[in-house]
Image (cartoon, rainbow, N blue to C red):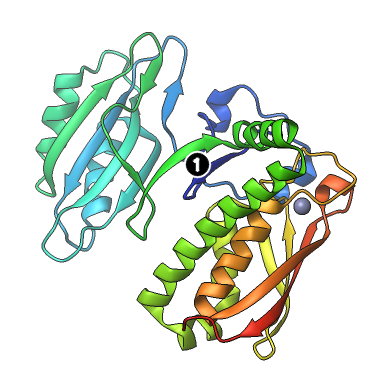
Amino acid sequence: MSRSLIISVATLETTSIPAYSGKQVRSATESQIEHPKIITAFMYIPKKSYFLLNLEIRNRLGDLAAVSNVLAQSGIEILSGSFTRGAVGNPGRWQVFVQPLNANFTSEELKRLVVSCPDVVGCQIKESREGLLVDSVTFPIKISSGQRAMIIRNDVWEGMLQKTREKFGSGGDVIIYEQGNMAGRMSGRELLAALGRDFLTKQLDQVIAMYQALGWGRAKILNFVQSPMTLSIRMWESAECMGQKSEKATGHFIRGHIVGHVEEIFGVECKCVETSCLAKGDPYCEFVLEEKKRGLSK
Ligand SMILES: [Zn+2]
């Protein structure tokens, strides 16, 4: 299964609208449990003409419904998109791939139609060429917390990690751990500054759920004691360990990330062991974190 991962981090498949990707080989069980979030960077629909619209939409209850209604009434089908309501005073954005049922619909006609809708205050449009339409309209990609992110296929990232291990042996594991730790510290610091320690402690299950939200793996807290700090996290389908085969656990980036996160948020020094790992043939990865000593900076 090809999965992708945003580094910093979120997820995108190379085009995977099921009807158009042509590479959906999944078992019934798998498709039942998956609820993938699709970020459409490009599409390929052979021999079809279709469009990408980047619309600025006036902030009003029902605005999106009004614009989609205008499209529907003209026989224009919505294929894939992303809508974000604007902050106070700013327009929202709807970036959407659409396909007219009438193949002769031109780009100019579509633009005229869309801007005729009073809720649309801005419109950019790109048309497919020989069935291929790459989103060169929107940039950059951002996660909802505001940071810029990039999309990298999960198998590419796995390959990078594997190469690091091949080249540097156990030193490679240390490099990967330190990279994860640095990333965990960054996001731990940001969360602490934005939400505060008490709030984060109460919401720790949601903090850990961010691993799922960002495509790293489905993670759940098994056990949490604040003092002395003990935290066990089980992660299914870890982006780091899926596809790896090893006698030892291989989740060094995520292990380092958890440690960095916890140390920044709680101000304690921790160590973390990956006690189960997909790479060893276990059904999930499991991380057990324990406090070393109290009294870091915060
Ligand atoms: Zn693992």
In this rendering, does residue 46 appear at all?
yes
Q: What residue would you read off at disc 1?
A: 38
Please tell me whether residue 138 is drawn above or below residue 189 in the rendered image: above
Q: Nearer the viewer, residue 266 or 128?
A: 266
Can you say whether 73 is above or below 86 in the image?
A: above
64 lies left or right of 250: left
How many marks the image carries: the answer is 1
Which residue is painted at 29% across and 26% down in the image? 136
Write down the quadrant of residue 245 in the picture.
Answer: top right
The answer to whether any part of residue 206 appears in the image is no
- Give the camera-side residue of 251 and 49: 251
- Asked which secondary structure carries label 1, the reply is loop
* Residue nearer the viewer, 18 or 161: 161
| Picture coordinates of residue 195, whole percent (x, y) | 40, 79
Q: Is residue 207 above or below residue 56?
A: below
Q: Is residue 279 left or right of residue 166?
A: right
Q: Note whether ligand 1 is within 8 Å of mark 1.
A: no
Question: Residue at left 11%, top 37%?
Answer: 115
Spot occupied by residue 248 in the image (x, y as percentages of width and height)? 86, 49
Query: Which residue is at a point 43% across and 76% down the rendered structure image?
Result: 192
Q: Nearer the viewer, residue 168 or 177?
A: 168
Q: Is residue 190 left or right of residue 218?
A: left
Q: Is residue 68 above or below residue 271?
A: above
Label 1 neighbour load within 10 Å: few <14, some 14-19, many 20+: some
Quarter of the image that includes the N terminus: top right
Residue 140, image x, y percentages:
30, 40
Q: Residue at x 45, y 62 (%)?
A: 186
Residue type, label 1? Ile
Instruction: Give x and y (percent) for residue 29.
Output: 79, 46
